[in-house]
Image (cartoon, helix red, strand yellow):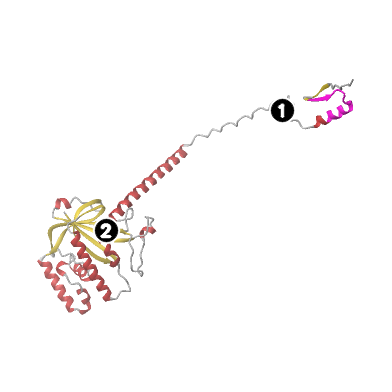
């Protein structure tokens, strides 16, 4: 009969770790094995529970209460807020005014735009070239007047410079003018004044010749030299918004004459883009005195009128245009 060896299992518990050994194992081996097992790292699930007192949460720092503002500080804050609001309002008004000015500029430049590039005077032009250029401008202006006479024009922002009755020479004034002309012809040193002789229309002669200025100065203070016509003119200027020193319309086209000094006003003054200023005045005429007397000097008005004709000249090398308007 064969014998079977039966192993009895003895369970030994060390701390929280359980070890299983065969019953017939050597006691010394058991001790050695127990010590080795005891030194092995323990898993988180078998970590011995600590009986220390749990850490208390740190108390939140007390909130600091800002001290109340003094009356002086409150006043300063109110002033800063007011200044910021005024600055924002000013900038808004400025942008709106510039937008209107640009719109008016386009209205005018759409009419006389083709004349602007050739109306600048060049230092390098010969006299014959200047005469030829004047002829070209005159012919083109005649065509522009023919195409625009009687057409409506709307300018949203124009400033009244003056309102006055249109004058003409009286008989006494004509006599005095003729006498002045005879004296000029006798004095060769003053013959330059006779260029552009147009004494009968010296109030309206264009361009403003030296003779016109000479005669006007000579008639200064002569109350009997002119008489009213019963027609009134209102002179409007187009000024740049928030700029009391510069006037004109925005012209963004290209100037073909490279030798000219171009100001590029818009770029320098951060209006937007590069542009040059072109002088453009508007003269509204009416026979109705009650209508003319309503316009106030330095006030801004919107103009809705009809074009009678347009005149062109050059002021210090810069093109200048005058629109004559009527009801």
**Range of magenta residues:** 18-35
Res 168 quadrant in image = bottom left
Instruction: Give yes or no for residue 313 being in the magenta stretch.
Output: no
Q: Earlier in the sequence, mark 2 or mark 1?
A: 1
Which circle marks residue 110 in the picture? 2
Name the front one of labels 2 and 1.
1
Extreme-left residue of the structure:
171
Regarding residue 88, the answer to whether it shows in the image is: yes
Instruction: Give yes or no for residue 21 being in the magenta stretch.
Output: yes
Res 196 quadrant in image = bottom left
- Please state which of residues 23 and 251 is positioned toward the viewer in this rendering: 23
Which circle marks residue 254 in the picture? none
The quarter in which the C terminus is drawn is bottom left
Do residues under tags 2 and 1 come within 8 Å of each other at their CB atoms?
no
The quarter in which the N terminus is drawn is top right
- Please state which of residues 73 and 123 is positioned toward the viewer in this rendering: 123
Q: Residue at x 16, y 74 (%)?
A: 181
Which circle marks residue 45 in the picture? 1
Whether residue 214 sits left or right of residue 20 in the image: it is left
In percent of width and height, residue 38 lies at 81, 29
């Amino acid at each position: 009969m064969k014998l079977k060896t039966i192993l009895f299992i003895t369970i030994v518990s060390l701390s929280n770790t359980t070890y299983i050994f065969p019953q017939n194992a050597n006691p010394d081996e058991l001790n050695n094995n127990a010590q080795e097992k005891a030194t092995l790292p323990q898993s988180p699930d078998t970590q011995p529970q600590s009986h220390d007192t749990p850490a208390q949460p740190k108390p939140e720092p007390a909130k600091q209460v800002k001290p109340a503002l003094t009356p002086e500080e409150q006043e300063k804050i109110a002033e800063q807020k007011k200044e910021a609001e005024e600055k924002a309002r000013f900038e808004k008004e400025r942008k709106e005014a510039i937008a209107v000015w640009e719109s008016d500029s386009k209205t005018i430049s759409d009419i006389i735009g083709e004349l602007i590039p050739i109306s600048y005077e060049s230092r390098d032009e010969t006299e014959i070239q200047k005469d030829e250029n004047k002829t070209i401008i005159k012919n083109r202006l005649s065509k522009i007047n023919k195409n625009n006479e009687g057409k409506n024009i709307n300018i949203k922002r124009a400033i009244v410079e003056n309102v006055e009755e249109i004058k003409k020479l009286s008989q006494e004034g004509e006599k005095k003018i003729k006498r002045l002309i005879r004296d000029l012809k006798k004095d060769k040193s003053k013959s330059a004044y006779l260029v552009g002789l147009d004494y009968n229309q010296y109030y309206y002669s264009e361009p403003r010749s030296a003779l016109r200025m000479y005669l006007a100065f000579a008639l200064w203070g002569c109350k009997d030299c002119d008489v009213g016509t019963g027609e009134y003119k209102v002179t409007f200027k187009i000024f740049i918004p928030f700029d009391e020193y510069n006037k004109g319309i925005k012209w963004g086209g290209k100037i073909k004459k490279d030798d000219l000094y171009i100001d590029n006003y818009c770029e320098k003054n951060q209006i937007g883009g590069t542009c040059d200023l072109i002088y453009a005045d508007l003269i509204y005429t009416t026979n109705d005195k009650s209508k003319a007397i309503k316009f106030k000097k330095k006030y801004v008005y919107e103009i809705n009128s009809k074009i009678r004709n347009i005149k062109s000249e050059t002021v210090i090398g810069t093109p200048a245009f005058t629109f004559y308007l009527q009801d």
